[in-house]
Amino acid sequence: MTFLKMPNYDIFIEEDGLSHLAKHIKEVYQFDDLFVITDQNVFDLYNEKLIQALIGYKLSFVILPPGEKSKSLDTYHQAIQTLIEKGIKRNHLILAFGGGVIGDLAGFIASTLYRGISYIQIPTTLLAQVDSSIGGKVGIDLKEGKNLIGSFYDPKFVFIDPSFLKTLSKREYNNGLAEMIKAGLIGDKKLYSYLLEHDKVTVTEITEAIQVKRNVVLIDPYDKKERMYLNFGHTFGHAIEKKHHYETYLHGEAISYGMLIALQIGIQIGETKEELYQEVKKLLLDRELVKEPLLEMDEYRDEIIHDKKNLADGLHFIIVTKPGDVKTHKLKELDIL
Ligand SMILES: NC(=O)c1ccc[n+]([C@@H]2O[C@H](COP(=O)([O-])OP(=O)(O)OC[C@H]3O[C@@H](n4cnc5c(N)ncnc54)[C@H](O)[C@@H]3O)[C@@H](O)[C@H]2O)c1
């Protein structure tokens, strides 16, 4: 088992580790009632395994429809009503069992119900294992935009078992690979080199990707400054997701186009080499994260310029100079007009 320490919680990473979950829960929680928030897909695939791993506990399930639409105020309210009906008390424990949608929503419920209940993250998608379950950001979407309501709320621990990834569709798997490629590019040359050659990851690479995020989060827990490095490719990625109403492209696909645009800007300002752009482009094409013809910055100017908040004093843009090395560049409105 691999084990990483955050200031307030541990991250356990173990292939086929589900049989050890009960032991970890015992270390942080003294009661028998567990409240599992999950989605229908994860429930159908894994409820028996979870029940088996947690024999002796009394499990209550809140099962939500899969997909981003569940990260809403309505679902938040309905899930809380169900939890209360099922008898949740302030000193009980919530298990966020699913992808990033469940992790963000269940974490936000935990941070607000009764002014805060303990919870643990059991991420079941690659994206959730390497990204959304780490760093304590939880929240929900509004119709006005994504992640507009939320908080920073640490779990008791994060429990990562890569064997959950065996049932992920190739598209969802690759969606997580995109965040790992980003992690390699911004902070781990060795991870990036591995991902150039392999389309499957193991505990080792999942741990390396988490380490990149962890290092940044430790310096900047409340997203004031250094966490912005994690946003490599995200300025354009978010614009792409928004323009297509979060439907056409998965997050990893949108940021893949975004990373290529960011590398092109790096070339324009003399910080990034053309060879790196070509190498990353080939990798993202091979992993079916982008398709030719590539999406161009021109098509998304309105979405970016519309975000006046970002442009008020220039956009702090992340440039990769070479794999593992980043710097910020202040992109002025003129640069993208
Ligand atoms: N909090 C953060 O720091 C942070 C960071 C990045 C992303 N996010 C959020 O994460 C969300 C996206 O997460 P996601 O990509 O995991 O999406 P998701 O939770 O919607 O999961 C994707 C799909 O995979 C299914 N699934 C989950 N586990 C499975 C498994 N083991 N086998 C088969 N199918 C499985 C789900 O039912 C769903 O249909 C977004 O809402 C995003 O805003 C949060």
Image (cartoon, rainbow, N blue to C red):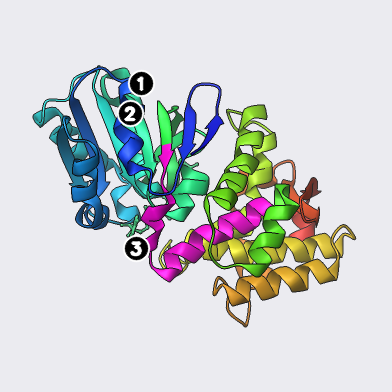
Q: Percent x, y for residue 312?
A: 70, 42
Q: Nearer the viewer, residue 43 or 57?
A: 57
- From the image, state whether disc 3 or disc 2 is nearer to you: 2
- N-terminal of the pair, mark 1 or mark 3, is 1
| Label 3 Cα crowd, 10 Å radius (few <14 / some 14-19 / many 20+) | few
As helix, strand or loop, the secondary structure at mark 1 comes to helix
**Which residue is labeled 1 in the image?**
27
- N-terminal of the pair, mark 3 or mark 2, is 2
Q: Which mark is residue 167?
A: 3
Give amino acid for label 2: Lys
| Label 2 Cα crowd, 10 Å radius (few <14 / some 14-19 / many 20+) | few
Name, please, the residue furthest toward the left: 85
Stretch of the chain drawn in magenta: 159-184
Q: Are marks 2 and 1 in contact (CB under 8 Å)?
A: yes
Give amino acid for label 3: Thr
Q: Percent x, y for residue 169?
A: 38, 68
Indicate whether residue 161 is drawn in magenta: yes
As helix, strand or loop, the secondary structure at mark 2 comes to helix
Q: Which mark is residue 79?
A: none
Relative vertical location of residue 194 with respect to residue 112 in this rendering, above or below? below
Residue appearing at x 48%, y 25% in the figure: 9
Mark 3 CB lies closer than 8 A to ligand 1? yes
Q: Nearer the viewer, residue 32 or 185?
A: 32
**Which residue is labeled 2 in the image?**
23
Name, please, the residue furthest toward the bottom: 293
* Residue 142 found in image quarter: top left
